[in-house]
Image: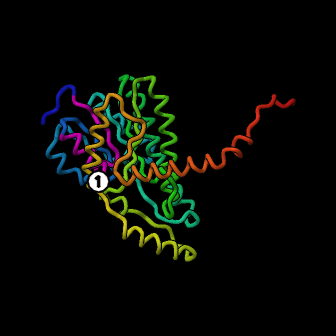
């Protein structure tokens, strides 16, 4: 399919592998143009040969703020505009909260939170100038709650979602939309390329239990299914702030929400008693 004047321009981080690769392929197959950013561009060679005029490959480490702004400007200059921005680049550190070193904790936040923040900041001037655009923040089931051994990963995604909710409210007045996409399990290299903390023997028993749970209940999906959902999302005139991807994550989201509401209701009296309006104290 050839590009038309009305085809959308995508900016996708982490475009060379996993979900980012699936989003890139789906957009190109739809006749859109894509600026695909990644640390390693070699996996995109085949796509570049197939879509030489519609795929722009850009080497990028999203933790480098200056580089992010430079690469976003290059993408806009090359294609003339930006329409869909997908903050997909991410990393996973596995380990108990107590086990994380300062460097490991900061590295987890640098990629998953600050990288997405820098991209969001860099694209907003271009989207505001257009008076349109759609920013997709690829979050995770880890943002629904904290889980054993992925606490810092969840923290990075909680931070991403808090920032993105504010961004959505701020961007709306300029005609720019923001959606938080919460995927469940997909066959990507997120897990195989994950890094682990130095294990503390105190958690050996818990770690063994988790390994058994993952071995028994881990059933992941093809990334192309997530891409199909994302294509529907960007085609919508009224896209949601949040979109769950997968039956498992859908059920987990409702279960966590119900349990939170039950707890809030059980402690309602204590919660309400903790507030009573009074006049401002005299200095």
Residue farthest right in this picture: 282
Up the image or down, 106 lies above or below 234; here it is below
The residue lying at 61 percent from left, 47 percent from top is 264
The picture places residue 158, in percent across and down from the top left corner, at 51, 48
Tell me the element at label 1. Answer: loop
- Between 244 and 108, the residue placed more toward the observer is 244
Residue 184 lies left or right of residue 1; in this view the side is: right
Name the image quarter holding the N terminus: top left
The residue lying at 48 percent from left, 43 percent from top is 161
22 part of magenta stretch: yes
The picture places residue 23, in percent across and down from the top left corner, at 27, 45
Q: How is the image coloured?
A: rainbow
The residue lying at 58 percent from left, 65 percent from top is 98
- Between 188 and 3, the residue placed more toward the observer is 188
Note whether residue 110 is visible: no
Residue 21 lies left or right of residue 107; in this view the side is: left
Give the labeled residue for mark 1.
17
Rendering quarter of residue 101: bottom right
Using a 10 Å C-alpha cutoff, classify the residue at mark 1 as few (fewer than 14 neighbours), some (14 to 19) or many (20 or more).
many
For the image shown, how many numbered marks are present on the structure?
Answer: 1
Name the image quarter holding the C terminus: top right
170 part of magenta stretch: no
User: Magenta stretch?
Assistant: 7-29
The residue lying at 35 percent from left, 23 percent from top is 130
Rendering quarter of residue 131: top left
Note whether residue 262 is visible: yes
The picture places residue 231, in percent across and down from the top left corner, at 27, 39
Residue 257 lies left or right of residue 4; in this view the side is: right
The picture places residue 144, in percent across and down from the top left corner, at 48, 50
């Amino acid at each position: 399919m050839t590009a038309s004047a009305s085809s959308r321009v995508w900016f996708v981080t982490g475009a060379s592998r996993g979900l980012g690769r699936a989003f890139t392929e789906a957009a190109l197959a739809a006749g859109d143009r894509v600026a695909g950013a990644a640390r390693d561009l070699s996996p995109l060679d085949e796509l570049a040969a197939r879509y030489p005029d519609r795929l722009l490959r850009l080497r990028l480490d999203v933790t480098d703020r200056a580089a992010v702004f430079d690469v976003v400007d290059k993408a806009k200059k090359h294609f003339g505009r930006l329409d869909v921005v997908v903050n997909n680049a991410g990393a996973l550190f596995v380990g108990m909260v107590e086990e994380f070193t300062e460097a490991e904790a900061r590295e987890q936040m640098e990629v998953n939170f600050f990288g997405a923040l820098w991209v969001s900041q860099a694209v907003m001037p271009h989207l505001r100038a257009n008076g349109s655009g759609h920013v997709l923040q690829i979050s995770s089931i880890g943002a629904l709650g904290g889980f054993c051994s992925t606490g810092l990963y969840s923290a990075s995604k909680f931070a991403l979602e808090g920032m993105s909710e504010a961004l959505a409210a701020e961007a709306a007045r300029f005609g720019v939309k923001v959606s938080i996409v919460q995927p469940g399990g997909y066959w990507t290299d997120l897990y195989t390329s994950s890094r682990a903390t130095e294990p503390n023997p105190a958690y050996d028993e818990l770690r063994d239990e988790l390994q058994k749970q993952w071995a028994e209940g881990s059933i992941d999906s093809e990334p192309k299914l997530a891409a199909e959902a994302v294509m529907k999302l960007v085609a919508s005139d009224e896209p949601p702030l949040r979109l769950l991807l997968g039956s498992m994550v859908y059920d987990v989201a409702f279960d966590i929400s119900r349990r939170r509401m039950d707890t809030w209701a059980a402690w309602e009296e204590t919660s309400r008693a903790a507030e009573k309006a009074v006049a401002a104290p005299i200095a």
